[in-house]
Amino acid sequence: MDTNVLFIFVLAVFVGFEVISKVPSMLHTPLMSGTNAIHGIILFGGILVLADADSSLTRILGFVAVIFGSANVFGGFMVTDRMLQMFKKKK
Amino acid sequence: MSSTIIDLLIIGVSVLFIVGIKLLSSPKTARKGNLVAAAGMFIALLILHKPSGDSVWTQGWSFNYTLIVIGTLIGLVIGAIGAYSVKMTAMPQMVALFNGLGGGAAALVASLEFKSGAQGGAESTPFIAGSMLFATLIGSLSFSGSIIAYLKLEGKFEKPHTFPGQNILNGLILLVILGLCGWLTFNATSGSATTAFIVVFCLALFFGVAMVLPIGGADMPVVISLLNSFTGLAVAADGIAIHNLAMVVAGTLVGSSGTLLTLLMCKAMNRPVTNVLFGAFGSSTSGGKAGAGDLAGKTVKPIQADEVALLLGYAQRVVIVPGYGMAVAQAQHAVRELSDELGRRGVEVQFAIHPVAGRMPGHMNVLLAEANVPYDQLIEMEAINPSMDRVDVCLVIGANDVVNPAAREEKSSPIYGMPIIEADKCKTVIVMKRSMAAGFAGIENHLFYKDNTRMLFGDAKASLQTLVTQLKAV
């Protein structure tokens, strides 16, 4: 498991570099906002720890993590969409 | 579901994330890209499984699940309100805030995993414990750093805060954090591990504040981009710790693309990233004074709106250079009216966009898009500079440092070498400005004193509306 994960990590680093290497600067803000939404996947980490929480402390902290992660993922995708719907070509 | 099917679906989710980011890098497909990534996120939620391989959704309902639903809904409402109420000018702050929340969540998840996994679990290895510590450190740093970046962009303490030995103090704190992390990696079950862990958490929060506080407001875009990639890496490390490959892939993609984006932004400002992070650029005034000295005795030439309207009305080609001042004055709609009116008169109008105009890369594009300016009218700096000498009138609206020829002419200037939009090469330059205050970098702008430059003082929005009215009468 450990080395497989590292393998995936290293490949993903290069893919991440490669896919945005040609992005025009006009899209930098939406791109930053869009990738910001993607790391909102941490919500699932929050769900996993909260599902197994067995004390008040872990419940409270897990609950906060879920709220934070949920705001990150939903807010991130919505705000990016709101920005992008305004990009229109001349009619 | 069998683990093979889950693995295949995770590969599918990874592809959706990659394709989503790829589509986000072209204006035509960007919106679709965002939706593709969101679809990937939804599938990842459906197949969410525990490290043991069991689905999270098939075990019995418990109080914890009620909390999960409530927490997700609260986050959804917070996110939706933030996303739909924020003004386009305040977009950078919103991204900083969402990023901070993600970082905070990553740190909390890692902390809880460290408590239950590394300290209680039998199968924990130093590699896993190290991943958790990394996620805690980077996540909490990103949380507190993003909050400071948010407050700075809100104008709370915009100026850099510095004191002698600051970098040394920060370096020492970082050394203590890294030392503790190194020790904890191999002694996660030791009696004093919990105390050491809490110390790491708090020091990392403090380090995030100490790292962003000395950086000037003008550099916040770079900081937000960097913290965005940090959060991505923290999420990836969390994914390693809880054996969730979708999190590893998503987090790593964000981490590496965010790092590249940060470097691209620094390149556009012609400054190494180390200079942004440790230079406390905004506080240096020596270069500014040197620049001002050469300008002694020179004066700016003001102009009235009716003259500008005449110049514009009889021009063949007009280039508009927007900057943060346009955002502050909420003048993007008035700019579009002016551009439409000129277009009706047969004047060729283009917008010259500097990569770091405004407070975030692409900030101007978003604002102008909001005002329905078609994006094929927006020309990037490199594309428009070669033909700037054939432009009749260049209208600079609230832009300052990005058109300062000192970047080309003045070796002592702090912005020397930064690529600029060469507004000074146009036949006539009209600078719309509220007052003679210096730009964000705090340095004098040589453009204002050029022979072909005229200053139109006043609020950008009001001036533009006057221009439109005057133009209709020409």
Image: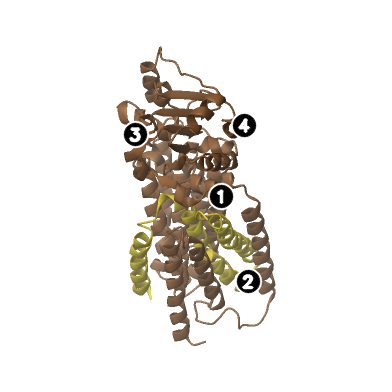
Chain colours: A yellow, B brown
Occupied quadrant, residue A46: bottom right
- Name the foreground residue: A77 vs B140: A77
Disc 3 to disc 1, how far (Cα)? Answer: 28 Å
Pinpoint residue B20: horizontal percent, then vertical percent: 46, 66
Residue B444 drawn above or below residue B272? above
* Pointers 2 and 3 within a single chain: no
Disc 1 to disc 4, how far (Cα)? Answer: 19 Å
Protein chain holding label 2: A
Pinpoint residue B57: horizontal percent, then vertical percent: 60, 80
Q: Is there a contact, CB below 8 Å, between mark 2 and mark 3?
A: no
Protein chain holding label 1: B
- Label 2 sits on a secondary structure element that is loop
Which label sits in the foreground, 4 or 3? 3
Q: Is there a contact, CB below 8 Å, between mark 4 and mark 3?
A: no
Residue located beneath label 2 in the image? A54
Question: Which circle's residue, 3 or 1, is located before the other in the chain?
Answer: 1
Pinpoint residue B465: horizontal percent, then vertical percent: 61, 34
Residue located beneath label 4 in the image? B462
Disc 4 to disc 2, how far (Cα)? Answer: 61 Å
* Pointers 4 and 3 within a single chain: yes
Residue B201 drawn above or below residue B471? below
| Dot 3 alpha-carbon crowd within 10 angstroms: few under 14, some 14 to 19, many 20 or more | some
Q: Which mark is residue B389?
A: 3
Q: Is residue B284 left or right of residue B96?
A: left
Name the residue rendered at 41%, 46% in the picture.
B379
